Image (cartoon, rainbow, N blue to C red):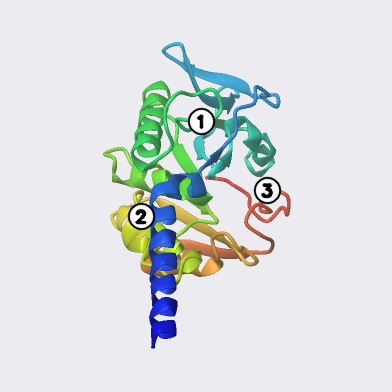
Amino acid sequence: MNQLKRMLLVALITFVTLLTVVTVFQRRMIYYPSHHSETNGLAPWVVDGRTIGYARKVNDPKNVWLFIHGNGGQAADRAYALQCFSGSDSVFILEYPGYGNREGSPGKSSFDSAAEAAYGELSRNYPNTPLCVVGESIGSGPASTLAKLQRQPDRIVLVAPFDTLASVARYHFPLIPAGLLLFDRWDNVEALAGYAGKLEIYGTIDDRILPIRHARALAKSLPLAEFYEIPGGHNDWPQNGTVKIRN
């Protein structure tokens, strides 16, 4: 009996320790910013004297895209994704607070605020040009929140997205109530429920970070969404040639 009690006590201590670690360090487990100075040929996107991202601008663009990237690296690292866009479109890649050289701390509030401010800036600068949004991975969260604005994006493209971040947390930590402990609770199902524009969702078949079940669940909740299953893992989509971002 004493041995059983000791085993139960060890199990309880281990469980509580795991809960504490996941709760305290969860943002370090979600966000992986880098801070190098390479621009990879992209022009700085400067607003009010501050660099808020990087851009590939063209004269008289047919469409303007706001690209909101995933949780690793920084905005300039996404130059490789430009091959997926039309050469007649301008593309602005948002830098997250706490990423690259941008001040701030990563999190839902700061990401959503940065996305809304960047979208508003583009809306003012291109009032008569179709304004579209791409959300990659965790960027699907702030991208989806833009669907709630008065001027909705003309098109939203989500690549390797999730339905809710809580469901992703439960997948990665099935033995603890990770969904309840989560600070940053993006819910793309709710955010996109009232979206009236064109919506494309791409799920990556061999994704181990955001398994395709999450993209499927999101698409299933949105009857008007166009859903595509593409080969490769979480970060393979720009290279495999299956995603053509157009409006």
The amino acid type found where label 1 is placed reads: Glu
The residues bearing labels 2 and 3 have C-alpha atoms spaced at a distance of: 30 Å
Q: Upstream in the sequence, badge 2 or badge 1?
A: 1
Question: How crowded is the residue under tag 1: few (<14 C-alpha within 10 Å), some, or many (20+)?
Answer: many
Q: Secondary structure at mark 3?
A: loop
Q: Is residue 56 left or right of residue 80?
A: left
The mark found on residue 238 in the picture is: 3
Q: Is residue 187 left or right of residue 59?
A: left
- Residue 7: x %, y % from top left: 44, 78
| Above/below status of 50 relative to 188 | above
Question: How crowded is the residue under tag 2: few (<14 C-alpha within 10 Å), some, or many (20+)?
Answer: some
The mark found on residue 186 in the picture is: none
- Residue 193: x %, y % from top left: 30, 58
Query: Label 2: which residue?
Result: 182
Q: Residue at x 35, y 60 (%)?
A: 189
Please tell me which residue lies in front, 191 or 37: 37
- Residue 66: x %, y % from top left: 49, 35
Q: Residue at x 62, y 30 (%)?
A: 76
The amino acid type found where label 2 is placed reads: Leu
The amino acid type found where label 3 is placed reads: Pro
Q: Residue at x 43, y 69 (%)?
A: 217
Residue 156 in view: no
| Above/below status of 136 relative to 114 | below
Q: Upstream in the sequence, badge 1 or badge 3?
A: 1
Query: Label 1: which residue?
Result: 95
Q: Upstream in the sequence, badge 2 or badge 3?
A: 2
- Which of the two marks, 2 or 1, is nearer to us in this view? 2
Residue found farthest to the front? 2
